[in-house]
Image (cartoon, rainbow, N blue to C red):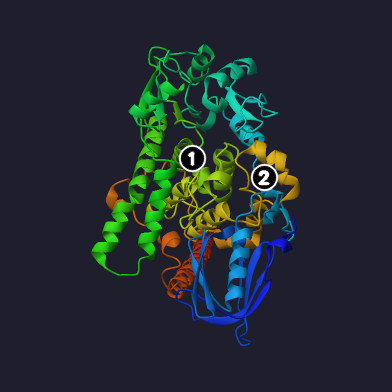
């Protein structure tokens, strides 16, 4: 298909762009296969807006006489308005944008056409291979092995080709366990706690059904992670009644009679449409400019967004507590094991592992626990908070995880190497990007699309020194301790950087942040001078003592 067929009017002049807290700008609007481009006419202060069609969530049309107005609502939550003279031109542009922003074929998306203008110093597609993670693990324990049982994706279509499993479990046993777990997602290692040798596994629900079906290989697999005489914990992210109802559909949970060394805890975490509706309500509340305090607070409460944050952080803290304080291994799963399961396992690692609080460590976590682990980004991020289309599989699962990281970051501002801008960047690229990193729903789909060969990785761009500096936290001090966030309602705040950034003037905030960075930089320079002077003073004192000793 040619993009030109979808573009009825490629260019319009005398278009006026309106954005909150910016003066209206007149200029030229151009449509390409992947971008909406607006160029201002002002010679003194030329301005350009490049907007990916894939970032457009919905558009609305209005007409007053012959003047048409298009309101574009984006997946990154911004709203822009374009005034276009001429009804026909306006209709043509609107229908073109609608067609270009809802392309069905993944291979027609911008990452397949994007050519980087920067020097590629590192291939991001091979930066965080599981083999490298296993090498790191092998330096502290020999109880695990790499399994290639899924090398052709036939055992589990949503798992990567390589997984880490207990050394005592062979591939034939893994195949049997895969048949006993929903979607073939057998228990695999998510995290190994070096401090006490405890492990966190993740999987999908067992297919016990109403007959109480069992699988001895499954029991052997998860028991292989237990120390002699110790118990483990299964954290099920469904409420008990939902887990019981799943048995009627062939699913279920680990029954104590077959897993006597494991204690099951249900920690309910919302998913799918309830989460999406919560997201929509929150964004609607943030865009309400009525400035009525009662209205704002009631809308914020009705969205339930902060309740979802609290529930998720509580479950992650529980998993971390079982591992670090109880000295027990943990298995986490819900139904499919591709959403709330990954939220819990990745947040628990943020709490437990200082490596995950560095930039590269966090990137590795996103790759390992989200991309390789089979979170369906293509489905979950197909729509954001403004879409008028009927919901299918959309849900802000990854955004909720990022917000929980931000909440912990806010409570421990010196313990993270990255700043808030890094988290916002990941949110934006998960929904619309020139990079292929978040395309597809799992590694199998990415392999079929040949993404590593045909698209550029986000990490290739982010990890260049000139880009990295933008995402570094100026007050970072490496902290090797476990960090325990407060989940009290008073400790949780609205993430203004995501939900209010388009609804308030940002100039003063940017100036304040710049000044803060300058103060920290100046403080470090002064500290360096103090250290030099201390060394010189120590040397002078030492010389003085030597001279005193030489005197007769």
Residue annotated with mark 1: 346
Lower position in the chain sequence, tag 1 or tag 2 = 2
Give the percent coordinates (x, y) of residue 382: 55, 50
Residue annotated with mark 2: 127
Give the percent coordinates (x, y) of residue 396: 47, 48
Q: Is residue 443 above or below residue 21?
A: above
Q: Neighbour class for label 1 at 10 Å: few (<14), some, many (≥20)?
A: many
Q: Neighbour class for label 2 at 10 Å: few (<14), some, many (≥20)?
A: some
Seen at 31% across and 56% down, the residue is 300
Of residues 116 and 78, the one nearer the viewer is 78
Mark 1 and mark 2 residues within 8 Å of each other at the beta carbon = no
Q: Is residue 330 above or below residue 298?
A: above
Seen at 48% across and 53% down, the residue is 477
Numbered mark located on residue 184 in the image: none
Q: Is residue 168 visible?
A: no
Q: Is residue 405 above or below residue 544?
A: above
Residue 138, quarter of picture? top right
**Circle 2 — which element?**
loop
Give the percent coordinates (x, y) of residue 45: 60, 84
Seen at 57% across and 25% down, the residue is 184
Q: CA distance from mark 1 to mark 2?
A: 19 Å
For this orientation, the residue located farthest to the bottom is 44
Seen at 65% across and 65% down, the residue is 35
Q: In the shown orientation, is residue 19 left or right of residue 445? A: left
Of residues 115 and 315, the one nearer the viewer is 115
Q: In the shown orientation, is residue 98 left or right of residue 267? A: right
**Circle 1 — which element?**
helix
């Amino acid at each position: 298909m040619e993009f030109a067929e979808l573009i009825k009017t490629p260019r319009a002049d005398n278009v006026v762009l309106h954005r909150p807290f910016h003066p209206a700008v007149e200029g030229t609007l151009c449509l390409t296969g992947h971008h909406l481009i607006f160029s201002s006419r002002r010679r003194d202060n030329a301005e350009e807006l490049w907007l990916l069609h894939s970032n457009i969530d919905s558009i609305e049309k209005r007409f007053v006489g012959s003047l048409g107005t298009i309101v574009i609502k984006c997946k990154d939550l911004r709203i822009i308005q374009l005034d276009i003279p001429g009804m026909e031109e306006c209709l043509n542009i609107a229908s073109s944008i609608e067609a270009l922003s809802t392309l069905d074929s993944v291979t027609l998306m911008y990452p397949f056409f994007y050519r980087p203008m920067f020097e590629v110093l590192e291939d991001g597609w091979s930066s965080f291979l599981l083999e490298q993670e296993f090498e790191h693990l092998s330096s502290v324990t020999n109880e695990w092995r790499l399994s290639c049982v899924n090398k052709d994706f036939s055992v589990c279509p949503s798992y990567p080709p390589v997984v880490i499993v207990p050394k005592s479990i062979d591939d034939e046993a893994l195949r049997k366990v895969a048949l006993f777990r929903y979607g073939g997602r057998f228990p695999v290692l998510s995290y190994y706690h070096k401090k006490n040798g405890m492990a966190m596994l993740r999987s999908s629900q067992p297919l016990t059904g109403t007959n109480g079906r069992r699988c001895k290989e499954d029991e052997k697999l998860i028991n292989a992670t237990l120390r002699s005489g110790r118990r483990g914990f299964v954290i099920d992210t469904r409420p008990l009644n939902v887990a019981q109802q799943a048995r009627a559909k062939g699913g279920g949970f680990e029954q104590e009679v077959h897993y006597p060394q494991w204690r099951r805890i249900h920690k309910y975490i919302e998913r799918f449409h309830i989460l999406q509706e919560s997201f929509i309500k929150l964004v609607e509340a943030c865009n309400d400019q009525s400035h009525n305090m009662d209205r704002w607070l009631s809308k914020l409460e009705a969205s339930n967004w902060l309740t979802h944050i609290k529930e998720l952080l509580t479950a992650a803290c529980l998993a971390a507590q079982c591992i670090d304080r109880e000295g027990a291994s943990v298995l986490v799963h819900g139904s499919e094991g591709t959403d709330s399961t990954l939220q819990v396992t990745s947040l628990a690692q943020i709490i437990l592992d200082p490596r995950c609080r560095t930039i590269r460590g966090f990137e590795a976590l996103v790759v390992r626990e989200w991309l390789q682990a089979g979170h369906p980004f293509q489905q979950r991020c197909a729509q954001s908070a403004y879409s008028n289309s009927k919901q299918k599989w959309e849900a802000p699962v990854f955004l909720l995880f990022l917000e929980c990281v931000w909440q912990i970051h806010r409570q421990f501002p010196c313990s993270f190497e990255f700043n808030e801008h890094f988290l916002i960047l990941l949110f934006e690229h998960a929904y619309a990007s020139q990079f292929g990193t978040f395309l597809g729903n799992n590694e199998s789909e990415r392999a079929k699309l040949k993404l590593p060969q045909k698209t550029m990785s986000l990490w290739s761009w982010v990890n260049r020194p000139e880009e990295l500096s933008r995402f570094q936290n100026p007050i970072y001090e490496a902290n090797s301790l476990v960090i325990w966030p407060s989940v009290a309602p008073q400790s949780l705040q609205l993430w203004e950087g995501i939900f209010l950034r388009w609804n308030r003037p940002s100039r003063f905030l940017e100036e304040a942040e710049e000044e803060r960075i300058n103060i920290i930089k100046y403080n470090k320079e002064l500290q360096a001078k103090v250290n030099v002077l201390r060394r010189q003073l120590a040397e002078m004192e030492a010389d003085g003592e030597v001279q005193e000793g030489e005197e007769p």
